[in-house]
Image: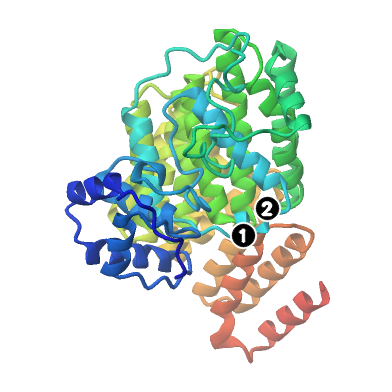
Amino acid sequence: MTERPAQRTPNRQLAALIAEAGFSNAGLARRVDQLGLEHGLDLRYDKTSVTRWLRGQQPRGTTPALIAEVFTRRLGRRLTAQDLGLDACAPVYAGLEFAATPEEAVDIVSGLWRKDSGSQAELRKIAFTPAGLVVPSRDWLIGRPDDRVARGEPQTARGPAGRAEGTGPLSGGRQPASGVPRQRGRTERHRTEHEAGRRVTAGDIAALRSVGELFRALDDRFGGGHARQALVRYLEHECEPMLRGVYGEQAGRRLFAAAADLTRLAGWTSYDIAAHGLAQRYFVQALRLSQAAGDRVYGAYVLATMSRQAVYLAHGREAVQLARVAQQGVGTSAPPAVQALLHAAEARGHAVLGEVRACTAGLVRAERALESARPGDEAPHWARTFDEGHLSEEFAHCHRDLQQYRAAAQHAERALQLRPVAQARSRVFCRLVLATARLGLGDLDQACRLAAEAAAQAADMRSVRAHEYLKEFERRLEPHKDATAVRTYRDKVAALG
């Protein structure tokens, strides 16, 4: 790797952390190389490279952020490149931080929105990292509630979020060593000053909620890729000015709750188009915003969403851990539908791992929790859709993963009966789980007919997940590729274009 000329000052911060972590120079280099491989990078550092860093040389590219992540994993606390005395270049881990304050949370998430709403496609190629789940979920579980989120008139010497301008994790780095802040352009300064004085009203927050319902409906029907970019731009241009505006304590909590919900939805739509690293970052930031909102139950929902992504990516152990952290975080006080959702999330993780007894126990707990709901029970708006139909779909997926095809077919059929037409993507998933179950039971004709129906429904969706479900079913058809039913199925799919 080409490196910058050596600085005169040895890097004492890095030396101290190497000693604390108990690394040798060769051991640190090896861990950085291994972490680089997770991101498709062939770095090839060695003990001599580390010696140069200790003498003051600055590694280029993504390496400072990778080194910081190595220490974060080892020491169990979030460290940045600057904490190691390194330049903040290309922060591949930006967005995985669980901010210390609401103001910092706004800085991080708004930087993520701005970068995602631009044309930098590399943000959507960032890899998912299972290790990046540990610190945020732990900090949410044991972190203290935010004492205050209200914002008044900003101080003139500070940026709009109460910290020096130009220091956000995605702003391109912190202040230069000279201490001179990065200067904003005239247009950017004018916009920021205007936004900082905006008073947030109840109508503003209601608008955020309404927009969330609109984008949620679009996602359910047409897939995450249909309006994802519009959602991100809305967050940048409408939600960020509110978060940087003027509001009291009660309004601030509601504002952060609405922002958390929209940010989780941005992550969900990113997940649906297979931008998994980006989705992971949105989920982490939604988790932090939910803490600022004082909404512990919604934070548990975000963790359940993260668990579902981990299931999809076959990280079953992490999926189980996330679901358990969510359960521990809300205890038994959560509404029945929320408890059912969290137990179902854990069951899905056990199913991926092939743990039959643990999966069955989780499903039983989910079923009992949902049955305990009574008419008139209060439930969050996002939990009201977790009903018998949704739970049947979770049962079907679990039994499919455990190769219990008769049970999978029964629950998939029940889910199709109960899932509304507007939840089109979920119905595609249910139909393909049913097709897989029928195939596993030896009914090739029925399996191909169901899959062809699903393919026709998915053709108009911008959902990578829906198309991956189809590909997975087609891989299962390979042993039967010469059968008439399979040839007919493939002709129908080819005709869809």
Given the current orientation, which residue lies at the most extreme bottom position? Answer: 482
- How far is mark 2 from mark 1, CA to CA? 9 Å
Name the amino acid type tagged 2: Arg
Q: Quadrant of residue 124?
A: bottom right
Q: Which image quarter holds the C terminus? A: bottom right
Between 398 and 124, the one lying in front of the other is 124
Between 201 and 497, the one lying in front of the other is 201
Asked if labels 1 and 2 touch by Cβ distance under 8 angstroms, the answer is yes
Question: Could you say where residue 177 lies in the image, as x and y percent from the top left?
Answer: 47, 39
Identity of the residue drawn at 52% across and 67% down: 437
Disc ID at residue 425: 2
Q: What secondary structure is marked by label 1?
A: helix
Q: Which image quarter holds the N terminus? A: bottom left
Q: Is residue 383 visible?
A: no
Between 154 and 475, the one lying in front of the other is 154
Number of marks present in the image shown: 2
Question: Could you say where residue 79 lies in the image, as x and y percent from the top left?
Answer: 36, 42
Name the amino acid type tagged 1: Arg
Question: Could you say where residue 210 lies in the image, as x and y percent from the top left?
Answer: 74, 26
Task: Work out whether 157 lies above or below 466.
Answer: above
Question: Could you say where residue 33 lies in the image, as x and y percent from the top left?
Answer: 36, 67
Identity of the residue drawn at 70% across and 63% down: 454
Q: Quadrant of residue 353?
A: bottom left
Q: Residues within 10 Å of mark 2 (few under 14, many from 20)?
A: many
- Lower sequence index among marks 2 and 1: 2
Task: Work out whether 444 lies above or below 405.
Answer: below
Disc ID at residue 392: none
Circle nearer the viewer, 2 or 1: 1
Q: Quadrant of residue 167?
A: top right
Disc ID at residue 465: 1
Given the current orientation, which residue lies at the most extreme front position? Answer: 8
